[in-house]
Image (cartoon, helix red, strand yellow):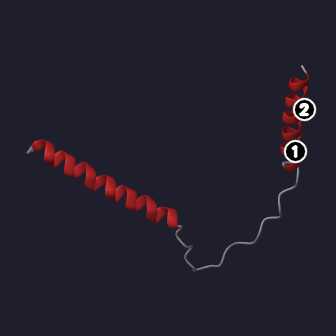
Amino acid sequence: MIQDKKTIASTLFVLISFVCSAQTPPPPPSGPGPVGLPLPIDNGILVLLGAGLIFGIYKIYHLRKKHI
């Protein structure tokens, strides 16, 4: 019974801390970005394109192997 009370108290403490941290006001919006300068492309895009290329090569290889 005491263990259940400790578990419930710990869970409530964690949940209350999340709620309290969510109550901070958002920072004021910044001005528009620089005009005419391209935004950098994240490295995640390059990884995604590489994975798509590898998957495409894999699928083409297996389709050709199946038809031979």
Residue ranking furthest to the top: 1
**Secondary structure at numbered mark 1:** helix
Drawn side of residue 51 relative to residue 41, left or right: left
Residue ID for mark 1: 17
| Front residue (pair 35, 41) | 41
Q: Quadrant of residue 4?
A: top right
**Secondary structure at numbered mark 2:** helix
Drawn side of residue 36 relative to residue 51, left or right: right
Whether 26 is drawn above or below 40: the answer is above
- Callout 1 environment at 10 Å: few (<14), some (14 to 19), or many (20+)? few
- Callout 2 environment at 10 Å: few (<14), some (14 to 19), or many (20+)? few
Identify the residue shown where x is 54% and y is 67%: 42
Residue ranking furthest to the left: 68
Residue ID for mark 2: 9
| Front residue (pair 30, 64) | 64
Identify the residue shown where x is 90% and y is 26%: 5
Real-space CA distance between mark 2 and mark 1, rounded to the nearest whole angstrom:
12 Å
Q: Quadrant of residue 1?
A: top right
Q: Dots 2 and 1: beta carbons under 8 Å?
A: no
Identify the residue shown where x is 87% and y is 35%: 10
